[in-house]
């Protein structure tokens, strides 16, 4: 059962946020070069800033 529920929960969490690059960084500045090891990984780890999606924002006024 967890094999079905965990991906659904993860997808729901990812969908609930708008993802942006930090400090106004543009997509052109993003370094996507890879290190070749047992598993290919990015040389510079990806940092993303989660912002609560507007459809989930509740206005209490």
Image (cartoon, rainbow, N blue to C red):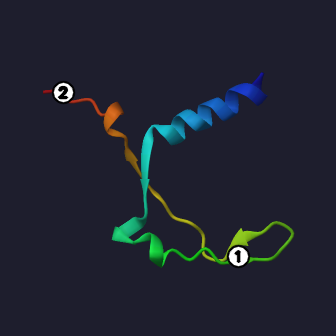
Name the secondary structure under disc 2.
Answer: loop
Residue 2 screen position, x and y as percent: 75, 26
Cα gap from disc 1 to disc 2, whole angstroms: 45 Å
Q: Quadrant of residue 40?
A: bottom right
Nearest to the observer: residue 30 or residue 50: 30
- Badge 1 crowding class, 10 Å Cα cut-off, few under 14, some 14 to 19, many 20 or more, is few
Q: Residue furthest left?
A: 61
Q: Is the N terminus in the top left, top right, bottom left or bottom right quadrant?
A: top right
Q: Quadrant of residue 4?
A: top right
> At x 48% / y 60%, what residue is drawn?
48
Left of 14 or right of it: where is 5?
A: right
Q: Residue furthest front?
A: 28
- Badge 2 crowding class, 10 Å Cα cut-off, few under 14, some 14 to 19, many 20 or more, is few
Residue 22 screen position, x and y as percent: 40, 66
User: Mark 2 or mark 1, which is nearer the start of the sequence?
Assistant: 1
Q: Is the C terminus in the top left, top right, bottom left or bottom right quadrant?
A: top left
> At x 51% / y 74%, what residue is drawn?
30
1 and 2 marks in contact (CB < 8 Å): no
Left of 8 or right of it: where is 2?
A: right
Left of 45 or right of it: where is 5?
A: right
Residue 18 screen position, x and y as percent: 41, 47
> At x 43% / y 43%, what residue is drawn?
17
Q: Eyeballing the image, is 61 above or below 44?
A: above
Name the secondary structure under disc 1.
Answer: strand
Residue 47 screen position, x and y as percent: 51, 64
Q: Residue furthest top?
A: 1
- Judge depth for marks 1 and 2 and give the one in front: 1
Q: Which residue is mark 1?
A: 34
> At x 27% / y 29%, what residue is drawn?
58
Q: Which residue is mark 2?
A: 60
């Amino acid at each position: 059962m967890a094999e079905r529920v965990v991906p659904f929960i993860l997808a729901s969490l990812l969908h609930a946020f708008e993802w942006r690059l930090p400090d106004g960084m543009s997509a052109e500045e993003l370094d996507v070069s890879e290190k070749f090891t047992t598993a290919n990984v990015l040389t510079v780890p990806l940092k993303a800033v989660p912002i609560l999606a507007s459809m989930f924002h509740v206005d209490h006024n």
